[in-house]
Amino acid sequence: MKTTLIATTAALLATGAMADVNIGNPMGMTGPIPDLVAPMAEAVDLAAKNINDQGGMFADGQTLNVIRADSACDPAAAIDAVTKLINVNGVSAIVGPVCSGAAIAQAESVSIPAGVLTVSVSASSPAITTMEDGTDLVFRTTASDAYQGVALAELAMANGFTDIAVSYANDDYNAAISEVFVQAYEGMGGTITANEAHEPNKASYRSEVATLGSTSENLALFSYYGSGGITLMRNALETGAFTNFIGADGMLSDELIEQIGAENLSTATFTTAASDSSTPSYAAWKAIADGAGVPASDPFVPNSYDAMFMMALAIESAGSDGREGLSEHLRAISSAPGEVIYPGQWAEAKAILAAGGDINYEGGAGNQDFDENGDVAGNFSKSVIVDGAWAAELIQ
Amino acid sequence: MWDAFGFEFVNFYLIPGLVLGCIYALGAIGITLTFGILRFANFAHGEIMMSGAYLTWTVMAIAGYAGMTLHPLVAMVPAALLVILLFLGTDKFFYKPFRNADTIKVVMASFGMMLIIRSAVQVIWGPNQLTFVRGIAKPNSVLSDLSNDIGLMLIIPNKHLFIFTGTIIIVIALSYLLNRTRIGKAMRAVSDSPDLAHVTGIDVDKVIRATWIVGGICATAAGVFLVMDVQMLETTMGFRMLLPMFAAAILGGIGKPYGAVFGGLVIGLAEELSAYPWIGDAPLLSPGYKTGVAFAIMVVMLIVRPQGLFKGRSF
Amino acid sequence: MEAYVGYFLYFLSLLTVGGIYAIFALGLNVNWGFAGLFNVGIVGFAAVGAYTYALLTTASSTYHMGGFGLPLPLGMFAGMMASAVIAGLIGLICIRLRADYLAIATIGIAEIIKLILKNESAVTNGPRGINKIPRAWEHFSEERFYSSWPMSWFGTPERWDAFFDHLPHWYWQPLFAGTVLLVMYVIYRMLERARTSPWGRMMTAIRENESAARAAGKNVTRRRIEAFVIGAAIMGLAGAFFAQHLRLIEPTNTFDPAKVTFLVWVMLIVGGSGNNRGAMLGAFLIWTIWSASELVITGSIDLISNIFSSIDTSLLVSRAGFLRMMLIGILMQVILQRYPGGILPEVRPASPKAYQKIAGTTGETK
């Protein structure tokens, strides 16, 4: 029984590998933030669909095959998943994972030794910037927390908050960005009146809220909305402990409006690695996303689309789906010089590349120009409630 | 002396602690009965609680399709029936074969059930969160006006009042069951001494079924109250609640339902009050360690006084 | 050709991770199979071993304490010792507890250990974890190792750099897998000798009938603590290897009881509790099933979506991971009921007296 299964699998995988371009997509489908990851996965699929609908890969129209695996936001699972993607499925490159811990682990353990290019969709730990030692194989379409923390601190000062209390969820993303924020804020002359971690996924944060609330009117909240962020805000609003709220990506979601109610969120401002919504690239992205029913501005969703689209462009530019040398092509298609390409413009891009031209992809989540470390600079927007929905405004 | 101190303490620490305590108490009742009568630690209890909450949500969703809005407490009733069936089913297929074998086997089986039930819920309902009711819960106006007149200020939203009342009703019902009905007395007999109970002709199987039924009702209630309080339903709820509930059962004494209630309240209060700035400005215990409070209490109890405060079984 | 290298590397990874889990299972067998201790805190000891190793062998860093860059074997040994010490402390307090109480206590303590590792960020970098953990054999190709003693004796950094450039990128994988398997084998031999020794027989006696053993004058508590500590030390070593495999450890998701603790218990029960060979067999078998099942499930979903192209399979894919867990749980229940001894049931060591029976007196052979 087991041998038949293995044989069938091998056959399935083998047929898959031959006529298609395979890209591995480890995402945290199970694990602590599945609700955050689901729309991101949809965005990746949307990118592949756009590409396949508009002529596929290379001159013979090969199908772009997204092979999804579950990295569960867990280093061990990510390593296992990527090992299989690289060795068994023979993928050309990796788009993912979602969590910084999983991304760093799989890169250091599997993909860098194997020489495979990785573009993470949302890993924002500052540690990734200095992770590599001479190789150029790890990129990301999300700005490092090092930038967003600073942007948030500037926002706080600009809003006139001279003192602020900080509460961060004790996981890798939120702890990292809160630390950057605290340093930047104090460096700008602000006072941090309290700085406490809170465990994610708890039933009640009333005591945390009460302890912090007595120190300041303002709260900097770093949490995932689904893992306790909503609960904490709810507790804070119910008890009237804070007047003003600021926070980062993890909190920015329509779910927050749905569960708490727009009328209660009038004093909340959240930043996110944005999407300058005034740009044509964002407009293009939004059109595509709305058409497919994908939430266009949920955290990291446009970044996921961009990552997959750019990876496909890089492979198309390289002319074959081999693993070597993809990094140069990735850099080439993402920055000037070149014709500007927006989300969804696969057919145009393909034509330009086929004719030997240069392109410069501008994505839904920003211009996605990689620096020497494979990072992108941040465009950040702050979002406030306007007419019952989040309205983003770019921070310059 | 109802100044800022009292107001904050009562409304932000004491009352939430009591709410959490009620939830732990209800869960712990089921655990202590299982422990006492069936003699094993049921690791799947937390997941059963969670399934009860999910089933309640489904009942509300179905009713919603039909155009009715049911209050969670009403939807809880059919859900509780389903949970009882679930309990009886798992007992028949997974626990009964080990009734006369090593305790270890049945605990391992319950451990396995924990994962099976959690995964099944994740497969059926998906990992996203769901909710019973939207919006934030404003304080009950009647109560806050009333208390204002006396010079206090109580901020208690309706949902908490429901939880308190519900718990009290269940505990009273339980006490009636255990003290006034035949089956209740039989349960206590089996809990104290199974062999003697068997000798006097008590039908142990019936008692076991009764245990699952009572446990199922309490577990569903605990799950629904938890979701009413947090207004969020997600699949990791069960395991998170499990260890504090074990702690509560051990604290109160295994096999003593009142001990479980008491233990639950103590653990709930301890968790919330541990973050209070008793001394100076900073919280006594860093909030990151709040979840550790229940574990620590439990470990201390196991070492110092394993039979619990109310002198339950100690083995 | 590249596909075959790929399959070979995947096979190596199955051996490596299976081997690490086998070491865990051997440690658990000392606790459970030898001494009947229901230790459900495996994850805690693994974390202690992993973090000790990481803190000692990584380069110094602003994010966390330690980073002494000590030699790897020293780091692994220290991981074992740290785990043993913690187990000793826990054992002194908890060893008298009855089976399910011990289970609850060990789970609770494992969670407390994880909370401490998570909250003491100054020491451990908290939830962000420690990365760039050196991996045996691969670490030779890292600059900080070949630029310093002892490798610098054998050549300049440039020559080493060129040397490693020539090797295939996966050169270290067979070596690492070999190391893990070698360590596993050594531990297996040692445990086999322990099992057939007087100490092992005494453990069996204590496990089977504690009061009789006590009546015979055995210091039951002390033996139990010994078994607990030895098992925990082995788990700590496995934790150190785990850290090397992952190269990044963090306290929340890596050490998830559902994945590590439960999986090791399933391995032991399926393979055969009380039997060292069973422990290893169970580990390789369950890990292969666990890892390969993802491929099978994804392949089947692909097949289904190819056949019925109208069905949207994205829902299935996102729930597939949960399905895996459910199936493993059901597998364990089935094994528990049908084959309680596991695939390789326990083999009692023959009593020495059996060898002394003089053939012919009673017509019996041993």
Image (cartoon, helix red, strand yellow):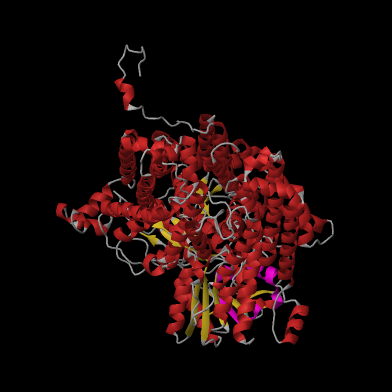
- Of residue C310 and residue B30, the one placed in the foreground of this image is B30
Q: Is residue C320 magenta?
A: no
Count of numbered tags:
0
Where is residue A17 shown, x and y percent of the image?
50, 41
- Of residue A38 and residue C291, the one placed in the foreground of this image is C291
Q: Is residue A249 magenta?
A: yes
The N terminus of chain B sits in image quarter: bottom right
Residue C346 falls in image quadrant: top left
Residue sitting at x 30%, y 50%? C138
Residue sitting at x 73%, y 82%? B147
Residue C180 falls in image quadrant: top left
Residue A103 falls in image quadrant: bottom left
Where is residue A150 shown, x and y percent of the image?
47, 78
Find the residue positioned furthest to the right.
B67
The answer to whether residue B4 is left or right of residue C230 is right
Where is residue A304 shown, x and y percent of the image?
55, 60
Residue B181 appears anywhere in the view: yes
- Of residue B269 and residue C324, the one placed in the foreground of this image is B269
Find the residue positioned furthest to the left.
C153
Which stretch appears magenta? A239-263
Where is residue C300 shown, x and y percent of the image?
59, 39
